[in-house]
Amino acid sequence: MLTEQEVNKIFSWLPYRDNWSADRNRIDDNKHAYYGDLISKLTENSLFDTYYSEDGGLGNYLEFICYPKGHVSYQGNAIIVCISLCAPIAAYGQTTFSKMYDSIGWGGLFTADKIGDITDTSLTNIENEIKALLLQHNLTLLDKEFASKQLPDEVIEAMRHENHNDGNQYLQGIFQKTD
């Protein structure tokens, strides 16, 4: 999937390769030039509604919460999609989501052992559309084995100083955010 050198660059919020188009560390990070079409297809989809919860401003990834279409308020299961800004990789899993008139909340990021596990069958069409879009945009889906690998101790220590970075697996190292 990725070499150790490439994955260590991602853990440091750097492009996994020198020629990677979406470098979040440049003034013009190019994320919309590279991911703009995919962002539109996830946020303006005819099959589901989406809460665009992380646009890369405070993280090294994009995050979308996709849930059944047509609800003024919603409380139930959803699919959370994470797309790296440092490499052409993505992961998705099931979460809970609540959207009320004046508030939004969700159950957080899935665990590495739950990548791609969508147990709520009412989300099957949404999952199929998400997978098709990710593959259409040449993104590699993280697998459970790779995402479950133990992070190096120095990465865990560096992440401890930032909020919302609980965990010690590659999943948490690849998808990080600060506060």
Image (spheres, rainbow, N blue to C red):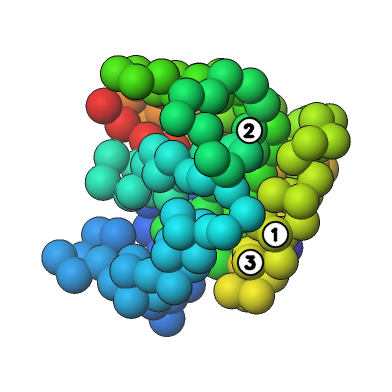
Q: Is 88 in front, or is 120?
A: 120
Label 2 element class: strand
Horizontal arrangement in the rendering, residue 165 relative to residue 136 (left or right):
left
Q: Is 55 in front, or is 25?
A: 55
For this orientation, the residue located farthest to the bottom is 19
Residue tagged 1? 129
Name the residue: 34% across, 20% down: 101
Asked if residue 66 is positioned above or below residue 153 in the image, the reply reads below
Of the residues shown, which amino acid type is indicated by label 3? Answer: Leu
Residue 118 rendering spot, x and y as whole percentages:
79, 36
Of the residues shown, which amino acid type is indicated by label 2? Answer: Ala
Quadrant assignment, res 147: top right
- The residues tagged by marks 2 and 1 sit, at their Cα atoms, a distance apart of 13 Å
Of the residues shown, which amino acid type is indicated by label 1? Answer: Glu
Quadrant assignment, res 111: top right
Residue tagged 3? 133
Label 3 element class: helix
Residue tagged 2? 78
Name the residue: 53% across, 59% down: 45
Asked if residue 21 is positioned above or below residue 160 in the image, the reply reads below
Quadrant placement of the N terminus: bottom right
Name the residue: 44% across, 40% down: 51
- Mark 2 vs mark 1: which is more N-terminal? 2
Q: Is residue 99 visible?
A: yes
Contact check, label 1 and label 3, Cβ < 8 Å? yes
- The residues tagged by marks 1 and 3 sit, at their Cα atoms, a distance apart of 6 Å
Horizontal arrangement in the rendering, residue 112 relative to residue 44 (left or right):
right
Residue 41 rendering spot, x and y as whole percentages:
50, 65
- The residues tagged by marks 3 and 2 sit, at their Cα atoms, a distance apart of 17 Å
Q: Give the class, few, some or many, for how many residues have Cα within 10 Å of label 2's Cα (few <14, many ≥20).
A: many
